[in-house]
Image (cartoon, rainbow, N blue to C red):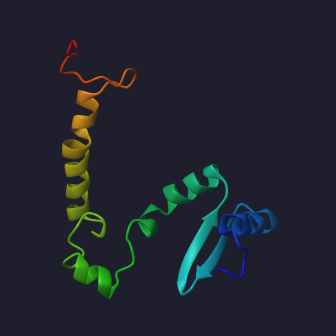
Amino acid sequence: MHLLAPVLHQAFHKLLTRYGPFIHIYIGSNPCVIVSSPDVAKQILKTHEMSFLNRPKTANTDYLTYGSADFAYALYGSLWKFFKKLCMTQLLGGLWSSCTLLGGRSSRGSSSR
């Protein structure tokens, strides 16, 4: 990676202007797809969603996360869906009920100072 350019995103931009809106490269032994257009990225993620859902399983993450039993490294399935539902309702659910989008004030009422 250090051989491409001092600033990595500029090197990727040069490659994408030369070869098209997306390229497939290997970073080490990991295959990577680099996309320059939001429309192409949306199309790729819609059609190949299942390919991008899981993270690579390594011995380090398996040991640190008790066999990939946490939210960040859970494989896509019923456990992942449960974690997502839990985060959306418990962690992010209170955010929208206690704060308005326009004013940013709490719904508990304003206290006079």
Which residue: 81% across, 67% down? Answer: 18
Q: Is residue 67 above or below residue 82?
A: below
Which residue: 57% across, 74% down? Answer: 32
Rendered-image quadrant of the C terminus = top left
Specify whether 61 is left or right of 55.
left
Q: Position of residue 27 (x, y in %)?
A: 58, 81
Query: In this orientation, which residue lies closer to the viewer: 89 or 106?
Result: 106
Q: Position of residue 66 (x, y in %)?
A: 18, 78
Q: Position of residue 37 (x, y in %)?
A: 66, 53
Question: Which quadrant of the view contains residue 14?
Answer: bottom right
Number of residue marks: 0
Query: In this orientation, which residue lies closer to the viewer: 41 or 14?
Result: 14
Rendered-image quadrant of the N terminus = bottom right
Which residue: 75% across, 69% down? Answer: 15
Give the residue furthest to the top: 112
Q: Position of residue 50 (x, y in %)?
A: 42, 65
Which residue: 22% across, 21% down? Answer: 107
Q: Is residue 113 above or below residue 48?
A: above
Give the residue furthest to the right: 18
Q: Is residue 91 above or below residue 16?
A: above
Specify whether 82 is left or right of 46.
left
Query: In this orientation, which residue lies closer to the viewer: 19 or 108?
Result: 108
